[in-house]
Amino acid sequence: LYLDDALNAVTGDANDRVMPYPSGEYDVERTVSDPDGTYLMLVRKYPDAGDRKDLSNEERYRHPLVLLTFPPGSRNATVRELDLQDKFIGEMLFLQPENDDDAIVCAGFYGNKAEHGMRGTFFLRLDRRTKEVAHRSFRELETKLVGSPVAFGEKLTKRIEAEQDQRRFLPRNIVRRADGGAALVAEQAYDYRVTETFNGRTTSTRHYVRNNILVVCADVRSEIQWVTNIPKWQSVEHTDNYGSFALAQQGEALYFLFNDRDGNIPEPTDGVGVFNLIGDDNNVTLVTLDREGSMVRELFMGSEHKPFLLIPASCKPLDDGRFFISTKNLDREMRFGFVTFD
């Protein structure tokens, strides 16, 4: 039993919403709750309930994204297809509104329907009352970001290209800026498996690759202002505990912490070197982005702390303004600490 927006008693579960499509014809990609009680659900709609497991990411993305809006106390949705005309939407995130003055912001990556692959990034701002798209902003990414694989060596690159699209950026987070704008944070991330047979014995090793960070900043109108690429190259076998990054925010600055190597500070002109667990010059790097997207790359934790490495997934901001960090060495010893960003 629950109460609708008119305080009428309704039998059933408030979360038992009625989907407008048969089971199997859609995937729920994102959900967000508006402070006014509206529940929004982003779904990928397919023409039938066929098996979608064999679809590549791009084949899946070419099916339309639909925004389902459930008014307060209602189990039935208003259906809106997010039509970008000659573009298709790949991955997309919602920015959760915190009060009545915050816009509902969506951001992600798009491709052109007449081409292959992801071509750029976008922001959408939804009207708080109607939930219709009130503003769109697009920015095509440089070819070197979306069209060129990271150099792994010719043989390995060809194998990865056959299995994965390693040029795809995955949205990791979207944060509200101090000036009322928003920043989309994405990462070039993928996994692959190498299977080898030697003397009749077959081994299989999974590799976790976490590369460049892409930051897209939009103003309070959700108009894209700048795009910054943070070079990073991480390739770790068997575990993804040490890959990716931790994100902190203080004032108008964004802070990124990740495992790296000494040779990448300052950033080499010919590209960053790879971080892996067996490197003898591993460190933790701090990258700071200011309000204009300018980047400072510096050493955060160096040789005196070796062989302790950052565990990004365990690093979190605290309510008192400090940032909690977690580290571990290969002997599974752990150390914890707190950081304050000025």
Image (cartoon, rainbow, N blue to C red):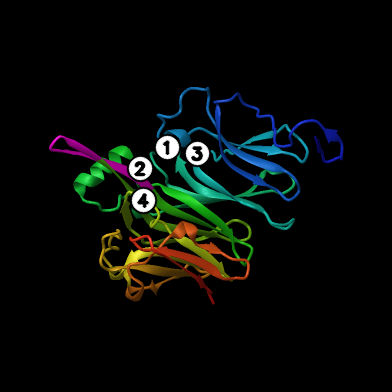
Q: Secondary structure at mark 1?
A: helix
Between circles 4 and 1, the one closer to the viewer is: 4
Between circles 3 and 4, the one closer to the viewer is: 4
Between circles 3 and 1, the one closer to the viewer is: 1
Using the numbered discs, state the Cα–Cα distance from disc 4 to disc 2 in whole angstroms: 20 Å
Q: Amino acid at mark 1?
A: Glu
- Which one is nearer the viewer's eye here, 129 or 186? 186
Q: Kindly check if marks 4 and 1 are in contact, taking CB atoms under 8 A apart as contact.
A: no
Q: Which of disc 1 and disc 3 is earlier in sequence?
A: 1
Using the numbered discs, state the Cα–Cα distance from disc 4 to disc 1 in whole angstroms: 26 Å
93 magenta-colored: no
Q: Which of disc 4 and disc 3 is earlier in sequence?
A: 3
- Check disc 4 and report the residue beneath it: 239
Q: Amino acid at mark 4?
A: Thr
* Residue 114 appears in the figure: no
- Check disc 1 and report the residue beneath it: 58
Q: Which of disc 2 and disc 3 is earlier in sequence?
A: 3
Disc 4 packing (10 Å; few <14; some 14–19; many ≥20) = few
Using the numbered discs, state the Cα–Cα distance from disc 3 to disc 4 in whole angstroms: 40 Å
Residue range (magenta): 190-203
Q: Amino acid at mark 2?
A: Asp
Q: Secondary structure at mark 3?
A: loop
